[in-house]
Every structure is written in structure tokens, then in C-alpha cells.
Image (cartoon, rainbow, N blue to C red):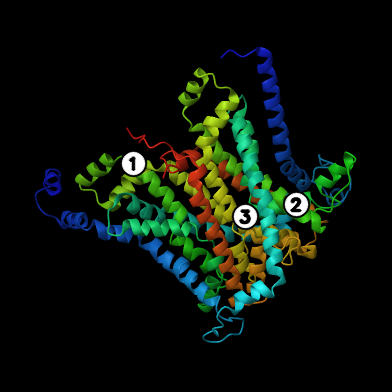
């Protein structure tokens, strides 16, 4: 039928071009494969093979200078990580500490500011831009700026604290202040999440609010019974991405504190430990084992979040909204 | 509901106070960056707060270009940016198109794999990839940074395209096919021109991820100064020159990295949200 329709448009003589087009028509599946081929090749080379090889490496004693097949040592790397490695617990603690504050605080700030901006007050676009701009600053630049901003003697923050009569803080050189400094830096970039929240808020149908107003609902009712439930998918999305990203924090610490993670390793985060083992000590097998543990933690956490999400994430009613 | 004008007034005061205070806090680090980038060398080591530089040292900007090979850093960064944009425009759109519109056996399985890779943290691939590129002699070259990007190795972009393409009405696709347009023709003549919002959004992501990339250039190019990117150059300036007496030049360098990002986001901002959300990509 497609062919007969087509012949009305094309000339009767079967040129090589039209024949080729007909062949293409019939071989859509082949075209489909051809179109996804570059991605699939990339998947094999850059995802699947490295992932499997990484798993294998984690059971070997692959180090710099290892020639040929690295010696298989079973679970030895893993046992060493859990029994001897004093930086494993330390770096995991630092990472979880950082996450525990930065992820919820970012979510709260982003959500609150998005809520206020969504009141459609005058000048909202200017405010939105001002809150968003810091999250556009490249991470390297943002980190370097904070290194100066938090500089003990010449940084803005301490000079400001002195000006208002408070005590200056050694932000990046005292072990107690390092993690709060990192959290501060991460909070500066909450604008990205705020924009996602704002897009979600603007997608909530106006008539829901009108219905609530007719029923005599106050502002708090609207927030608690309409806005927040309808926003739970977006909150879930931001929470998940925030956790996955937070576990892999690296650049900020590397730039601010170097590979040691600052005094008393107060800023030694997990990825930095992985990096050091691989690219400073060249213990690739051991480092691979560390990375597998991080992967498992992220994987289990993601699964747990996804499977508990149906208790609190509102995925719309059963009715199809297509009709 | 009629609101008492006085409570309305109070409400507005509270709202604007919160917004203004918040915006000032967010802007202070950037303002301080601009201000420090325009301070003379002896002004940056004064221990007193001075927000407006006096005198204004415009010469810091040309000075940085003399002190550091900024143009070379920029060229190196652009190599990665261009590879990234090519990948985002050609292989990624083709794959997104196939996932959205061409039925082929196993499509759902392939798409499931695609989604799964979005959850795969980079850290579990880092070491094998490094060993692999080292084995074939590609460390200290652009190869490891370019090849994945040229192949469009980014599940997120493909996912965004697929969601957008699914929103393009089936009729348009069918009539084009009946008129004898090939799959390639439909992709190029119909889907690409209709997809400006999502193309703009993905282009912004591609640009900014390439512009901001730090870990990969660090691992592969760290020992080859000739190929350093802006991010590596900035890190080195802050790390080795000491934090104190070149603070102004460090802030000049930061501004050089920030300004292109601001320009890109300024021109792309209206597409950013519409391209990502309009066609229901958040609905799945």
C-alpha cells in the first residue's frame, strides 16, 4: 500500500534512486541498527568492557610494572580495604558527612527559593537570574574563587567577619572548618536544582489551586496538599541525582586541598582516595576494588530509593491525561 | 479571595527582603571576583575589606595573557568542545531518532541498556579506560578526550532527543515517508529543523561539560603542558603560584572561564527549560 501511494508521486521509470529508496523502506530495521551503532560501539568500548574489566581488576594485584596477566588474589583487596585501610573509613565518613549536609540543604534552598519565585512577583526574572548564575560558573573557577574568598587573611569572608566584629576562621586550613567550607561551596550552586523545581512548579495546573481556593483552602493547605505532593517526582529526581553526584565529589577537594585532603585528612573524600591509589600509588587493582565498593553503595542506595519511592512520590492518578 | 491591603503589603515586604538578601549573598563571591581581578598587586594583600578597587587595574587582563599561554589553553579546550558538539549533533540525534521512530528488533532492550548506563558512575570505568588508552599509547594526547565524544557517547543526550522526537506527531513522519523521503531524509529535513529547542539545550550541556571537564584532562593531559585546557591552566595557576600574591590574576583567569559560560547560557536560557521539559521528558 505504501508502494502504491508512493508511485503516484514518483515517475513511472524505476531509477536507481527510487529503487534504492524502496530498498531502504524495507530495511528500516537495518537503518535503525545503523543509527544506534555509534552509541552501541561507544557502549561496548567505554561502558561494558571497562566495567567488566574493572570488576576483574579488583580481584588482582595489578600495580605499576605488572607485566602480562596480573596475579589473581581473590578477595584480598577487599579484605585489606575493610581491615587495614585506615583511609577507607575516614574517606567514607568525610564523604557521607559532606553528603548528609549538602544534599538536603541544597534541596531545601532550591525548593524554597523556587516557591517564592513562583509567586510571580515583579522582578522575578531578575531574581531568578541572580540565583541561577553561580551554578553556571565552571566548577574549577567556582572552586578557585572560593579558595580566594575563604583565604584566611585576604579572603572576603574573614575580612567581612572582622569588620562586623566576629572572629575570623581558618576555613581551609583548620580540620574542623574544611567540610563546612566544602558544603558552603556546594550550596553556592543550588541554582541548577532551583530551575528544575521552578519548571516543575510552573507545570502545576492553575485550576487545582482555584479548586482549593473555592473549597476555602489557605496558602498552607495549597502548599501541603497540592504543591508538595505534585512536586514529589521532581524532589525525588533532584535527591537521587544529588546523592549520586555527591558521592563522587572530587574536583573541589583536589583543587582546594590537594591529594592529601588537607590537614588531618579532614577533606579526604572517597573519590580522592580512589584517585590517589590509582594515579599516585599506581595500585590499580586495589583502586578498582575501592571503586567497586563505591559503585555498590550507589547502586544499593538507588535501588532503595526507587523501591521506597512509591510510598512518598506521587506519580499522578490512574487516569490517562492523554484524552 | 480579597486580601487586606495591609497584609498584602507585609507579604510583599517579606518576599522582597528574602529575595534581595538571598540574591546579595549569592552575588557577593562573583562581585568579589570581579573586584579582585581589577586590583593591583599591593592591594590584594591588604587585610582590610575593600570592595571597589582603587586604582582600577585593567592591565591585569592583558597581563594574564602574557604570563600564561591563555590562547593555547583556549584552543585546546575548543578542540574538546567541538568534538563534543559534533557528537551531540550527529550520532546522538541519529540514535535518539532511531529509538523514537524506527522499529527494530530489540529496540526496547537497547533502550534499557541506554538508561542503565546513565546510572553507571564514571569511577568504575576510570581505571580500565586509563589502562586501555595507556596501552594503545593515547595518554598525553587528545584521543581519550575526543573519541568518546565523537561517537556521541552520552546516554543523557540520546535520551533527551528520543523524548523530544516522540513528541513530534506521527502524521508528519508518515507523510514524509510516503512522499519518498528516506529515514536519513526525515531525520535531516524534518526532525532536525523541528528540534531546535532540544538541540539548543543539548548543545549548552555539551559545551559546558566539555568546557568544565577537569578529571579527564587531568588524568590524560596533566603531564603534557602543551595540551592543557583552561581548567588545568587555572588549577595550576592557583596551585603553584601561591594563593596570595597572584590572587588578582587568578580571578582574571576565573573571569575568562566564566564569561563564555554566561554568554552561552544567556542566549540559550529560553531553550534550556523548554527543550528539556516541553515534550514531556520529565513524564517519561
> Crowding at label 3, few (<14), some or many (≥20) Cα neighbours within 10 Å?
some
Q: Is residue B133 above or below residue A32?
A: below
Q: From the viewer's side, name the closer residue of A57 and B190.
A: A57
Helix, strand or loop at mark 1: loop
Kindly identify which chain the residue marked by label 2 belongs to: A
**Disc 2 to disc 1, how far (Cα)?**
47 Å
Q: How far from the left and from the top, in percent, is residue B252?
A: 72, 50
Kindly identify which chain the residue marked by label 3 belongs to: A
Q: Are marks 2 and 1 on the same chain?
A: no
Q: How far from the left and from the top, in percent, is residue A154?
A: 84, 50
Residue at the front extreme of this rendering: A311
Kindly identify which chain the residue marked by label 1 belongs to: B
Helix, strand or loop at mark 2: helix
Residue B72 numbered mark, or none: none
Q: From the viewer's side, name the closer residue of A215 and B15.
A: A215
Q: Residue at x 23, y 43 (%)?
A: B174
Q: Which residue is mark 1?
A: B168
Q: Which residue is mark 3?
A: A246
Q: Nearer the N terminus, badge 2 or badge 3?
A: 2
Q: Quadrant of the C terminus of chain A?
A: top left
Camera-nearest label, 2 or 1: 2
Circle 2/circle 1 CB separation < 8 Å: no
Q: Residue at x 50, y 61 (%)?
A: B120
Amino acid at each position: 500500500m505504501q508502494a502504491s501511494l508512493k508511485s503516484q508521486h514518483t515517475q513511472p521509470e524505476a531509477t536507481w534512486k527510487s529503487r534504492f529508496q524502496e530498498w531502504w523502506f524495507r530495511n528500516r530495521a537495518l537503518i535503525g541498527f545503523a543509527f544506534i551503532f555509534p552509541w552501541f560501539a561507544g557502549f561496548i568500548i567505554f561502558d561494558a568492557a571497562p566495567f567488566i574489566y574493572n570488576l576483574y581488576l579488583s580481584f588482582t594485584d595489578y600495580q605499576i610494572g605488572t607485566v602480562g596477566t596480573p596475579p589473581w588474589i581473590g578477595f584480598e583487596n577487599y579484605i585489606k580495604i575493610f581491615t587495614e585501610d585506615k583511609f577507607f573509613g575516614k574517606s567514607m565518613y568525610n564523604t557521607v558527612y559532606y553528603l548528609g549536609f549538602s544534599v538536603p540543604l541544597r534541596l531545601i534552598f532550591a525548593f524554597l527559593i523556587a516557591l517564592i519565585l513562583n509567586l510571580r512577583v515583579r522582578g522575578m526574572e531578575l531574581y531568578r537570574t541572580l540565583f541561577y548564575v553561580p551554578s553556571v560558573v565552571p566548577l574549577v573557577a567556582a572552586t578557585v574563587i572560593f579558595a580566594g574568598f575563604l583565604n584566611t587573611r585576604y579572603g572576603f569572608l574573614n575580612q567581612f567577619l572582622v569588620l562586623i566584629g566576629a572572629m575570623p576562621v581558618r576555613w581551609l586550613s583548620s580540620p574542623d572548618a574544611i567540610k563546612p567550607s566544602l558544603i558552603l561551596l556546594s550550596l553556592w550552586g543550588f541554582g541548577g536544582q532551583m530551575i528544575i523545581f521552578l519548571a516543575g512548579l510552573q507545570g502545576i495546573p492553575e485550576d487545582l489551586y482555584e479548586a482549593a481556593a473555592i473549597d476555602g483552602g489557605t496558602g498552607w493547605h495549597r502548599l501541603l496538599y497540592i504543591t508538595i505532593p505534585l512536586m514529589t517526582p521532581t524532589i525525588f529526581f533532584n535527591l537521587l541525582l544529588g546523592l549520586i553526584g555527591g558521592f563522587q565529589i572530587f574536583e573541589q577537594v583536589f583543587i582546594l586541598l590537594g591529594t592529601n585532603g588537607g590537614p588531618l585528612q579532614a577533606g579526604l573524600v572517597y573519590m580522592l582516595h580512589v584517585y590517589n591509589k590509582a594515579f599516585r600509588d599506581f595500585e590499580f587493582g586495589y583502586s578498582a576494588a575501592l571503586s567497586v565498593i563505591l559503585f555498590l553503595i550507589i547502586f544499593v542506595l538507588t535501588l532503595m530509593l526507587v523501591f521506597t519511592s512509591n510510598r512518598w512520590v506521587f506519580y499522578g492518578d490512574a487516569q490517562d491525561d492523554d484524552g | 479571595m480579597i486580601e487586606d491591603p495591609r497584609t498584602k503589603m507585609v507579604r510583599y515586604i517579606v518576599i522582597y527582603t528574602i529575595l534581595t538578601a538571598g540574591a546579595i549573598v549569592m552575588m557577593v563571591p562573583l562581585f568579589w571576583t570581579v573586584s579582585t581581578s581589577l586590583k593591583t598587586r599591593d592591594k590584594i594583600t591588604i587585610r582590610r575589606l575593600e570592595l571597589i578597587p582603587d586604582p582600577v587595574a585593567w592591565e591585569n587582563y592583558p597581563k594574564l595573557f602574557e604570563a600564561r599561554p591563555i590562547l593555547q589553553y583556549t584552543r585546546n579546550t575548543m578542540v574538546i568542545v567541538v568534538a563534543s558538539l559534533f557528537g551531540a549533533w550527529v550520532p546522538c540525534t541519529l540514535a535518539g531518532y532511531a529509538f523514537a521512530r524506527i522499529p527494530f528488533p530489540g529496540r526496547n532492550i537497547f533502550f534499557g541498556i541506554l538508561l542503565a548506563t546513565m546510572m553507571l558512575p564514571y569511577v568504575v570505568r576510570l581505571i580500565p579506560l586509563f589502562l586501555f588508552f595507556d596501552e594503545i599509547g593515547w595518554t598525553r594526547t587528545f584521543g581519550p578526550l575526543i573519541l568518546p565524544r565523537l561517537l556521541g557517547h552520552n546516554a543523557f543526550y540520546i535520551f533527551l532527543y528520543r523524548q523530544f522526537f516522540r513528541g513530534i506527531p506521527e502524521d508528519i513522519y508518515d507523510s514524509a515517508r510516503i512522499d519518498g523521503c528516506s529515514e536519513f531524509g526525515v531525520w535531516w529535513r524534518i526532525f532536525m529543523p523541528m528540534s531546535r529547542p532540544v538541540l539548543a539545550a543539548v548543545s549548552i550541556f555539551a559545551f559546558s561539560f566539555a568546557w568544565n571537564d577537569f578529571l579527564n584532562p587531568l588524568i590524560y593531559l596533566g603531564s603534557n603542558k602543551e595540551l592543557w585546557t583552561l581548567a588545568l591552566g587555572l588549577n595550576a595557576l592557583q596551585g603553584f603560584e601561591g594563593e596570595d600574591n597572584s590572587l588578582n590574576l587568578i580571578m582574571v583567569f576565573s573571569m575568562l572561564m566564566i564569561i563564555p559560560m554566561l554568554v552561552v547560557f544567556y542566549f540559550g536560557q529560553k531553550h534550556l527549560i523548554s527543550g528539556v521539559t516541553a515534550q514531556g521528558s520529565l513524564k517519561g
